[in-house]
Image (tube, helix red, strand yellow):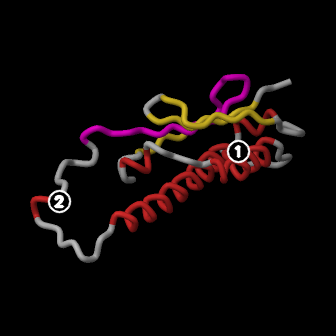
């Protein structure tokens, strides 16, 4: 029996790790382009969630009665110390697909408190569907 999992990490530290089963697993799907599309879709779900949290955070910090001076503007480059997110799909602890993206486009408070609990079922479903397909795309 194979052990399927996905991992979300920031700077090598695990944020979320889930194990799941895949019915009718098709071993050829691992070499398909569909697994790469699946990883991109999963990362897009996570990034959309982080954008929503960023908008909420920024609006909560907004004060229309406070004028900002030039000295208050943070001018440090956002990529001075980059926070890297990694999303991986694994089978038997072997990475079969991964995608890396930067977290520096999100506020620090958002990227250090990532909460994807409500989209985990969608991520797992997407991976399960991809790994159990009968027909898939391969590059010639």
Q: Position of residue 91 (x, y in %)?
A: 72, 28
Q: Position of residue 30 (x, y in %)?
A: 72, 36
- Mark toward the start of the polypeptide (1 vs 2): 2
**93 part of magenta stretch:** yes
* Towards the viewer: 102 or 18: 18
Q: Position of residue 27 (x, y in %)?
A: 80, 33
**Residue at the disc numbered 2:** 73
Task: State which region is magenta.
Answer: 80-98
Q: Quadrant of the N terminus?
A: top right
Residue sitting at 19 percent across and 54 percent down? 74
Do tag 1 and tag 2 residues touch (Cβ < 8 Å)?
no
Quadrant location of residue 19?
top right
Q: Is residue 40 left or right of residue 61?
A: right
Note whether residue 122 is visible: yes
Determine whether the residue tagged by mark 1 lies in a helix, strand or loop.
loop
Determine whether the residue tagged by mark 2 lies in a helix, strand or loop.
loop
Q: Is residue 130 left or right of residue 65?
A: right
Residue sitting at 64 percent across and 48 percent down? 117
| Front disc: 1 or 2 | 2
Q: Quadrant of the C terminus?
A: top right
Q: Is residue 53 left or right of residue 136?
A: left
Q: Given the current orientation, which residue lies at the most extreme front position?
A: 65
**Mark 2 Cα within 10 Å, few/some/many (few <14, many 20+)?**
few
């Amino acid at each position: 029996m194979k052990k399927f999992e996905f991992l979300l990490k920031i700077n090598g530290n695990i944020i979320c790790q889930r194990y799941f089963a895949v019915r009718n697993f098709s071993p050829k799907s691992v070499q398909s382009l569909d697994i790469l599309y699946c990883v991109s879709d999963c990362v897009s779900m996570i990034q959309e969630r982080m954008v929503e949290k960023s908008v909420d955070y920024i609006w909560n910090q907004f004060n229309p009665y406070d004028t900002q001076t030039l000295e208050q503007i943070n001018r440090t480059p956002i990529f001075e110390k980059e926070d890297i997110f990694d999303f991986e799909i694994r089978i038997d602890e072997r990475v079969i697909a991964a995608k890396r993206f930067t977290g520096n486009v999100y506020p620090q408070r958002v990227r250090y408190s990532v909460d994807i609990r409500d989209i985990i079922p969608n991520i797992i479903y997407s991976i399960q569907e991809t790994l159990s397909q009968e027909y898939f795309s391969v590059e010639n």
